[in-house]
Image (tube, coloured by chain):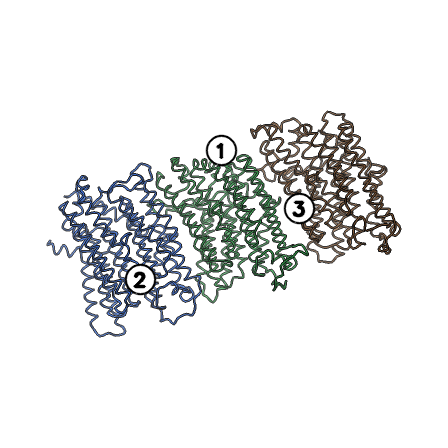
Amino acid sequence: MSFASLLFQFLTPEFMLADTALLVLLAGLFKSTAQKRGMLLSLTLLGGIIAAAMLVLHPHYGNLSNGMVVGDPLTQLVKLTLLTLSLITAIFAAGSTVREHFAEYLGLILFSTIGMMLLAGTEDLLMIFIGLEMTSIPLYILTGYLKRSSASAEAALKYFLVGGVSAAFLLFGLSLIYGVTGSTSLADLARTPRAALLDPLLLAGVVMAMVGFGFKVAAVPFHLWAPDVYEGAPTPSAALIASGSKVAGFLILAKLLTIGFAKGTGSAAWGLFQPGWLPLLAIAGAASVVVGNLAALSQSNVKRILAYSAIAQSGYMLLGLMATGTTGISSVIFYVIVYALTTLGAFGVVSLVEQRRGGSQLHHFQGLHQSAPGLALCMGVFMVSLAGIPPLAGFFGKFYLFAGALGSVSSLYDGNLGLLWLIIVAVAFNAVSLYYYLIVLKHIFVIPTGAEPAQPSPRCATSVFVGFLALAVFALGLYPAALLEPIQNAVTSAATFAAKTAALH
Amino acid sequence: MPTEFLLTATFLSAFLGVLLILLLPVRFGAAAKWIALAAALAGFGFAIAAFQRYDMTPGAYPIQSVLNLPWVQHPNIGFTTGADGISLVLLLLTGIIAITGVLFSWNVTQQPRAFFALFLTIIGGVYGVFQSLDLFLLFVFYEIVIVPKYFLISNWGSTNREYGAMKLTIYSVVGSALILLALLGVYVLAPDHSLNLLSLAKVKYPSAFQLWAFPVLFLGFGILAGIWPFHTWAPTGHVAAPTAVSMLLAGVVMKLGSYGALRVAMTLFPLGLEYWRIPIALLATAGILYGALVALAQKDLKFVVGYSSINHMGFVLLGLVTLNTIGLSGAVLQMFSHGIIGGLLFAVVGRMIYDRTHTREIALLGGMNLAKAMPFAAFTFVVASLASMGLPGFSGFIAEISILLGAWKAFPILLVFAGLGVIITVAFTLRALQRTFFPAHGAAAVPHEDAAHEFEPITLPERLGAILLMAATLGIGLFPKILLAPIQWSFENPHSLMHHLIQEVAK
Amino acid sequence: MSNSLLSLLTFLPLLGAIFVAILPAHRPLIRAAGLGFAFAALGAALTLAFNYDSAAGGLQFVEKWEWIPSLHIQYHLGADGLSLMLLLLTAIITPFALLALGDRVTKLNTSLILLLQTTLFGTFTALNFIHWFLFYELSLVPVFLLIRMGGSVKATAAATQFFIYTLFGGFAMLLGFLAIHQATGTFNLVDLATLAQHHKLSKALTAAFHWHPDCINLLVFGGIFLGLAVKVPVVPFHTWLPDAYSEAPAPVSMLLTGVLSKMGVYGFLRLLMPLFPGLMEHLATPLLAFAIVTIVFSALAALAQKDLKRIVAYSSINHLGYCLLGIFAVTAALHGAANERAAALNGVLLQVFNHGITAAALFCFIGFLERRSDGLRGLNDFGGLRTVAPVLTGLMGISIFSSLGLPGLNGFVGEFLIFKGSFALAPLASTLAAIGLFVTAVFLLTLIQRVFNGPLSERWAGFRDLTLSERFIVAPIIALMFALGIYPQLLISLFNNTALKLLP
């Protein structure tokens, strides 16, 4: 079979999405009518659903060109998640403040999604870079979509500059890695002798790559762009940045570190620091948790609160990455998916509130429980889940994440609970976080509204999907196995799969 | 119905109530209280049925009606419930407080659906904690209680409600963060990575781990139990809360803390317990004295009751660390007893008095001639005060002498201070009682401008609730065997989780 | 049926209290119901006394049920001569007080008095410490509320003081008994007395606590002593008493002095003496000193009072001091002459009963005086009442002379027996205590002098003598004083054998 047909088989869903995007753009050229937005959205959803159906019905497992494109249950699961997140974002967009050039907006969402899905399905340094750029460039545009809003333009510029710099770091780091090892495949990297991993040049490469990723996932100290971008960007764009791009980013970071540099972990245990990427993760993670949670305390805009909360959540996920083995990866993936669903829902609520009340400051949320009790309840679910309170999914995710991080490393150092200090920081600041989530809820539920501003009729589709996400968060809290077991199976089979392909070489 | 499902039915009935109330159209909001009452009665009924079926024949295991359903395969988490005498007593308490809480909130007209839904959520969570045998499940139920408390207080509360609500929530969350931390450690070190209490209790944890994990866990639970000096959430929270929630807080939520300390911290970490026993006893005694002394100086009647909770919970903690059957049983009985008495006191102060007079200043209340204006409230408060003082014939007496008996064995010196606390308790209770209801004639009582002395009469639900609580404290005071027998049996049973420890201390 | 006679007696007044509480607020109805129950209780108490086999002595009518097995607490009742004598006293004083209430009967005070009667019956029959303590402490509640009914600011303070003092004492006692339970595993007073007889109690205490043997025994003894000393009261733990007696309404004071103060003496006889005879002998000197100080100080204090109620209150302390003297003299000489010891103890029991009715009568008369004088009751407020109120003068005079210990009246026999016994057993202490007798005579005679003799002030020209109903109220008591003065055997026969058995 030719390379091209193989490639097509592996990437059918991505091609389907690209076709859909082009079709949507084409449809957008026709004269604007009242039904146009609905029509464009239906087209997008149709294409997305077909792509998802292809993913589910005709999964293609295998490895193309030494890890350039990879198909395994894990990538399939993640791609499906990414698709879902993007489509829900598209639905939110239809009901949001984005009014002009709607077809292009949807097209950009789809293009960005393709980038994310490519990112999810590769184990090759070059493809990683390409995927990241394919994800980011549409996102820059999506951020600056509100032409008349200076905040939006400023956010786009900031995002673009920071993104460009991080891409440069990443590229530089990856090139150093390639220069030392002579291969762009993660599987090859994994076979590099341990001694070579201590090569200062390679270490520099790893550090640079991690700085690049640090920008992407908004980890401290590379987080400064996030609050402004989340605040300035149109809400659906911010939702996509916070959900889909984060899922893809964490999956690839996990692959890079645990597959490519499995031997260069080092140690972050208290009193037993050893150079490697674990100490870096530990410090970045702990700093994100601390800074994100503390900075969120003093915010007055819900989107900014969500931004700082995103920084803090990145911190938890970085800590989760420290857990090695299948448990570690499955806990991070479970956590990041749950987080994405939750934060997407929260942005959905914010989008609706903006639509009705003209802003996303805390005071715009006052008395929401009177005017829209269902929406208020959903927001309650999202906030409480982000705070990690049972019985919602966020709690189980955190428990599993922390237990994984604590357990895996301690078993390495026979009974010395070396990572305990990190967990203490995480748990303590998680307690702090409840404060600002409660502040949001206080405005929604406790403080009565003043005069209710006139509001357009609610966007039905958005509300329905917000409700759906809230239900999902609730259900996953009550029965986490529904998502956890597929993830665990996928991770296990992906691991055996990787081992098999490694053995072939 | 099999007994294991009776236990499950307690919290299911509460959550079903929540669901029904949420489905209720806004127009029928007034029906929410009936649904809540029905749910509370059903829960209590199930608790009684489970209590009656408790089997104390020799050779039986203390923890009975164990239901074990798989929940999550990996990590190994089960939906495991079951109850021994201790749990059953507390389940009964929850049932009584649920019913009376609804009765004393009969007049809630502001968003009744939300109020009763949140109220029942807490009740369901509390029922759940008292029967969970899987620590993960226990923690889930434990946390379910936290957020509804915040909204109940900040939405329906009174004085300084947002501050009180936030303070209480932050303290609770800090407590649960400590618990979570220790549970993570337990989970990681458990050989089979399970959180099943029955299997964990057999694990011997390394002593280095126990030495730090025990205080973390104990303190985590202790904060909710109002352990001194981490008690400050309690008075402000109690004062800010609406009546039913004060009753819940004092009645059952504080018991979650002491129950957790007993069931989890003390069961899992005997070595840590031994090491930290004396410091905890000191803290408990300090709480007894401090609560009583501060209560003596309060001007707000609800603060008096709030600090009295600190005082009474100090006895619970002291009883727990005596580590002999009598002291431990006394502690559990005191949990029940204080639940009832604290609930009753808050009911009188919050509902009967404050809702009618709109003040809780003792000096102002003294000028209203309440004993004449509200004889029933006065009568109830007298009974509650006497019970709170630990007068013989009321449940508090048996509980406190059991604790003191236990303390004679364990800490004879501390006993004197605890005893002093008892005396001061009498003093502050008497002071509040006198100045509020029976101020001396001719005393310079501050006249209250709208003291027309014509208050709306005490309603039927209030009377029913008060009578139920009074009957409970008097009934248990006269026939403590009903509760003491299963409690004691659960401690003394050779299969009991604590048995080994008690034996060891006895040596 | 006969087995639960004591329980029936105990809970009969409680039933009455509840019944009165639910009656409509119609005064004659309440009065009739209250009196009905009180007299029924008197009848029951008399039945018990007649059915008691006084020749056999010892505990009879015993009832015993498991109550809280885990703490070794039983519902354990029984009565011997001592208990029966006190049951009779309670049953006599209660209707007397209810009658003395006159037209001030309310639902509240009637049911509180009946409730108080239940707690008293309970206290005088309990044989398990916790069971005893339950009623002992419970009695505080009605008493507290009854004292408050005096209405003045001082009454409130007095009630609180009384409550706190007694509770504090009660708590000290509770701690002591908890220690005993700790050592022996029982609260059963009969068993404990048996243990003490065989000298096992102090050994068990020593063994349980690993402290210095004297230390723990002394501590436990001290706790129990303190509790009882507050109740009797023993000087210097008496400060609550004058205020409480003088501020409470007169009928309440009757109950306080007539029966409530007897709880303390009963406690000494039932709890302390049987449990710590050895220690009490050891501590004879300080204990006797307490008794002497109580007797002499209270007599002198009474001399200095200007308020009739306070005078009688202090005299009440004084009279109970003789009881203590008798008890401590008996324990001071464990190996003294048996007949002297028996005489002293019989004297104590007799004195308890006599003082009960005499002091109650005195307060009743002061109540009559107060009602006629709009609350005035100063020693110097009256004068010459003899001329306008001869019947009152005569009857109150009899009571005062009874209190003085005039031969032929009841007070004499008790005090005589006490001094007869204690002079032989503890001569020095008895001699010192005799000072009290003289001072008592002085202040009581002064009372008669100032109130009834001398010139009649114009203010009291219209002073009414006792009405017919008032005469009927006090007549039985006066008759009883004479009867017991002339034929004390009437009562002594009831408890003589018990006293012999009580002797440690």
| In the foreground, B333 or B453 | B453
Which residue position holds label 2? A231
What type is the residue that disc 2 sits on? Answer: Glu
Left or right: residue B459 compared with residue C354: left
What type is the residue that disc 1 sits on? Answer: Val
| Cβ–Cβ under 8 Å for marks 3 and 1 | no
Vertical arrangement, residue B166 with respect to residue C179, above or below:
below
**Residue A361 horizontal/vertical position (percent):** 36, 63
Quadrant housing residue B82: top left
Quarter occupied by the C terminus of chain C:
top right
**Residue C241 horizontal/vertical position (percent):** 71, 44
**Residues at discs 3 and 2 both on one chain:** no
Can residue C260 be seen here? yes
How much space separates mark 3 and mark 1, taking CA atoms? 42 Å
Task: State the SS at label 1.
Answer: helix
**Residue A288 horizontal/vertical position (percent):** 31, 51
Task: State the SS at label 3.
Answer: helix
Quadrant housing residue C265: top right
Bin the neighbour count of mark 2 within 10 Å (Cα to Cα): few under 14, some 14-19, many 20 and up.
Answer: many
Rendered green, the chain in question is: B
Colour for chain C in the figure? brown
User: Residue C161: which disc?
Assistant: 3
**Residue C103 horizontal/vertical position (percent):** 77, 55
Vertical arrangement, residue C426 with respect to residue B327, above or below:
above
Left or right: residue A130 compared with residue A387: left
How much space separates mark 1 and mark 2, taking CA atoms? 61 Å
What type is the residue that disc 3 sits on? Answer: Gln
| Letter of the chain that mark 2 sits on in the rendering | A
| In the foreground, B167 or C82 | B167
Colour for chain A in the figure? blue
